[in-house]
Amino acid sequence: MRRNYLSVYATALSMGAALLVSQGSSAAEIIRVAYAGSMGVVMDRVIGPAFAKVHGAEYQGIGQGSYGLARQLEGKLIQADVFLPITPGPVDILKKAGLIGAAVPVASTQMVIAYSNKSRFRAEFEAAAQGKRLWYDVLRTAGLRFGRTDPATDPQGQNIIFTVLLAQNFYKQPALAEQILGGYQNPQQIFTESSMLSRLEGGQLDACSGYLSAAKSHNLPFITLPDEINLSNPDLDAKWYKSVQFAITLPTGKDVKLNTQPLVFYAAVLKNSRQPALAEKFLQFLQSPEGQKLFKDNGYSPPKGSVIQ
């Protein structure tokens, strides 16, 4: 009796081990993509699932401010296979850390002013969107609630400051930056990307900074801005965009002076990727006709500039 029991027990263990091996071999590979927070809709709802379906993989997205993501990846606080930030600055952080190779441009965008349909200033914003009012006059209205992201951790938080500084010069309005922003690191205006958009959609904010791509992805009404201040035209970068700079204090306490960078989204495979082959396929998918169509359908412009080696 005992011998039969041991035999049955051994057989069960063998079958269980075989089942685990079978399940492990058939488990989907996981691709982890760390992307600029403004790309949440297109990455998590469109591109990520489309890639996962084609390759039989599981997609996991990590969306935050690009500089914050770069610092976390640099410090091994998070792990990812692909890095997809906006502007070259976050790319440079990981290149200096030896964590990425070439970064390829996959899309681009421009700065806009998004506004809330629930704002009491909605009529004024709509008039500005139609060119019947000056957008900056609306933004400096007393009592208007404006939101933006943190310039210490997010390129968008830096880019809205550049946009307002350029507007200050372009429209010859010397005090415009102070009137709209109330200081570069004004805590009353600074929110995370997701919190800012939810507050805008709920009416707790009247307007916020934004990228054209994100505004379209979230179906938000917005005001377009001229090339001279929307940071989208590479031909204006050296002679005009870079005419403005500003300084901020980083979370480390270090003061830095910042210059404009082109609003291009880059993609790179991390050298500590757990799925390097799958990560390379993800980059190829982003650059493919299918991937580019998905970007276009969600409000993104074609990639600009060259590969960052």
Image: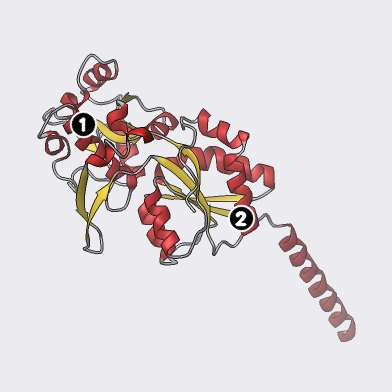
- Relative to 138, is 37 on the left or the right? right
Q: Position of residue 80 (x, y in %)?
A: 51, 58
The label nearer to you, 1 versus 2, is: 1
Q: Residues within 10 Å of mark 2 (few under 14, many from 20)?
A: some
Look at the numbered discs 1 and 2 and tell me whether their residues touch, using CB distance below 8 Å: no
Which residue lies under the disc numbered 1? 167
Please say whether residue 202 is visible from this viewpoint: no
Please name the residue shown 24% across and 58% down the image. Answer: 250
* Residue 30 circle label: 2
Residue name at image x 10 percent, y 33 percent: 174
* Residue type at the position of mark 1: Ala
- Establish if 9 lies above or below 290: below
Secondary structure found at label 1 = helix
What kind of residue is marked 2?
A: Ile
Q: Position of residue 273 (x, y in %)?
A: 56, 61
Q: Residue 185: where, in percent of width, then height?
A: 19, 48
